[in-house]
Amino acid sequence: MHALGKEVFVSELAPPDLYRREIQIFEEKGIPFELGGHSEKVFHHDVLVACPGIKPQSEIIQKAINRKMEIWSEIELAYRVAQAPIIAITGTNGKTTTTSLVAYLARETGKKVYLGGNIGVPLVKVALEAPADSLIVAEISAPQLEFIRSFRPHIALLLNFSEDHLDRYITMERYREVKSRITENQTEEDWVVRNADDGWSKGAFSRAQSIYFSLNPEPLWGAYLKGRTIFLKDEREIPLLEIDALPVILKANPENVLAASACGILLNVPPQRIASALISFPGVPHRLEEVTEINGVLFINDSSGTNPLSTVRAMQAIEKPIILIAGGSEKNADFSSLAKACIGRVKHLVLYGATKMRIASACEENGFHLFVIEDDDLKKVIQKARSLAEPGEVILFSPACASFDMFNDFEHRGETFRMLVWEEKEACEGKH
């Protein structure tokens, strides 16, 4: 907004020593700021733009509400300055992979595609850069939707809804309400891509036109699975490709493939080009990412597995015996589904982090006893997992929890895992 000539004031609760680079930028650009706390200066402006990390019940937000100050999410600001149409993807699981896949597919239109939102680049930065004849593809999380007013994606993808973020939302109903806001400003000129197998996605209110995806061969317009074959259907039924032709990351979550394919129909991408894009999709870091092998044992980094369902789906994509590493910070999730999924699929479960005892209890209650509890040292955890693995098996790092007990975010966690695995490999090779 400073670039558009608007008066901007930055207020941050964290101390200055965490923002040395940002301080330099603010000073160079002449942007007033305060660090280490929120003062009355915040309320001397017309609009408060809240970062997703700020909870609605926080003191600064409550003060702004009491003073009847207008509050926007960052994506609301982005929408107001954007010239290009926005394709917005939300859901509990699969957002980042689907967003990356949709952006990859969208390039088949010949337009320039900008990727942002919850995937790493702030949507407002992308919105300022993208010209009107381009496309913006955005991953949208529930916290980003809390303070929207006019945010209106031309295409909204509703992937799925399951238990998550219960540390932020007291009830599942409130979480569902916030997520559903992604469609509330759409009109008949827009589109919503719905998951026909998910009650929330199928039933979410929208004035937009609907297209569907499903794991079942239903007579619907969109994309669906029949046996092991993906089909597209608009005026006619078109076999697209076999599931077995997909990269591992996409095999794990065929719903993501179907959702992106349905979006491809709306973007008028020819079926053969949708198929070739799916086959050549390079994947996303920290999502079923193959790191390396050590003595015939494959290490897979799935640090993006931040809830039980995501980890269960990762396990289902792997056909070899699994040594699973799980645990992390608390989001009040129910780990019983994870424990049940481990039976017959996981050879050993290695637990660490703040949630390790709760996961262990869920395992005991659901009849899975092949687990060990380790200290909160990821290097020792990796070494323990390796001691339990045999050639031909897989060590899967898919924590089923958030990362904030030990790491900045799941990317930091995944990068640390990757680095420690390579250190372990170098140490192992040095002994030979």
Image (tube, rainbow, N blue to C red):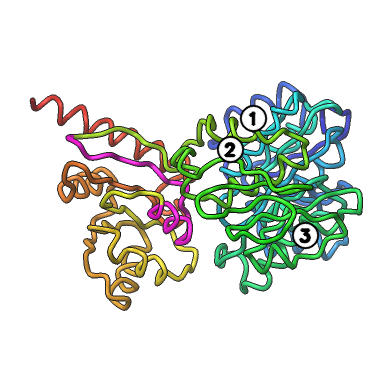
Relative vertical location of residue 208 with respect to residue 123 in this rendering, above or below? below
Which numbered disc flags the more N-terminal residue, 2 or 3? Answer: 2
Which quarter of the figure is the C terminus placed in?
top left
Which stretch did the figure color magenta? 295-316
Q: Earlier in the sequence, mark 1 or mark 2?
A: 2
Residue 376 in the figure: left or right of residue 337: left
Tell me the residue that label 2 is attached to.
16
Question: Disc 3 on helix, strand or loop?
Answer: helix
- Answer yes or no: do the residues labelled 2 and 3 have beta carbons within 8 Å? no
**Relative to 360, residue 414 above or below:** above
Residue 187 position (above or below residue 382): below
- Assess disc 1: are there few (<14), some (14-19) or many (≥20) residues with their C-alpha within 10 Å of its C-alpha: some
Label pair 1/2, CB-CB below 8 angstroms = yes
Quadrant including the N terminus: top right
User: Which residue matches tag 3?
Assistant: 181
Question: Regarding mark 2 in the picture, which secondary structure is present there?
Answer: helix
**Which residue matches tag 1?**
23
Residue 49 x %, y %: 78, 47
